[in-house]
Image: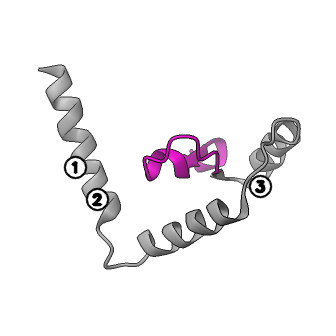
Amino acid sequence: MKDRTISIYSAGKIFAATGMRSGWMIGAPPLIRAARSVHQYNVFCFYNPVENAAAKSIEEISKPDNTYLSELATKLTKGRNLLIQ
């Protein structure tokens, strides 16, 4: 399955930062090459301080003892369950 899947992430979504248009893809090299051939026509300007903040934030949440993503998942699950009820 992983040879057919591209995972797409957004710093704006992960950090609840509306307007932060910074994202990335993870996938098999042939899929990423194909996606990049389309993406080159859809790029936004990005301010360096915001780019640095996103990079530092991703670095922090990647640390083994950081609980941000698990807490975010729990928060989103609770909100989803409330909406379903």
Q: Quadrant of residue 52?
A: bottom right
Q: Residue 76, image x and y in percent?
A: 27, 41
**Where does label 1 land, which residue?**
74
Residue kind at label 1, given as amino acid type? Thr
Residue kind at label 2, given as amino acid type? Ser
**Where does label 2 land, which residue?**
70
Number of numbered markers: 3
Q: Which of the two marks, 1 or 3, is nearer to us in this view?
A: 1
30 horizontally vs 50: left or right = right
Describe the element under mark 2 as helix, strand or loop: helix
Q: Residue at x 81, y 36 (%)?
A: 42
Compared to residue 15, the image places residue 60 above or below, namely below
Part of the protein shown in magenta? 1-22
Q: Residue at x 57, y 63 (%)?
A: 54
Q: Residue at x 44, y 53 (%)?
A: 15
Residue kind at label 3, given as amino acid type? Pro
Label 2 vs 3, first from the N-terminus: 3
Q: Residue 14, image x and y in percent?
A: 45, 51
**Where does label 3 land, which residue?**
29
- Around disc 2, counting alpha carbons within 10 Å, would you say few (fewer than 14), some (14 to 19), or many (20 or more)? few
Distance CA(mark 2)–CA(mark 3): 28 Å
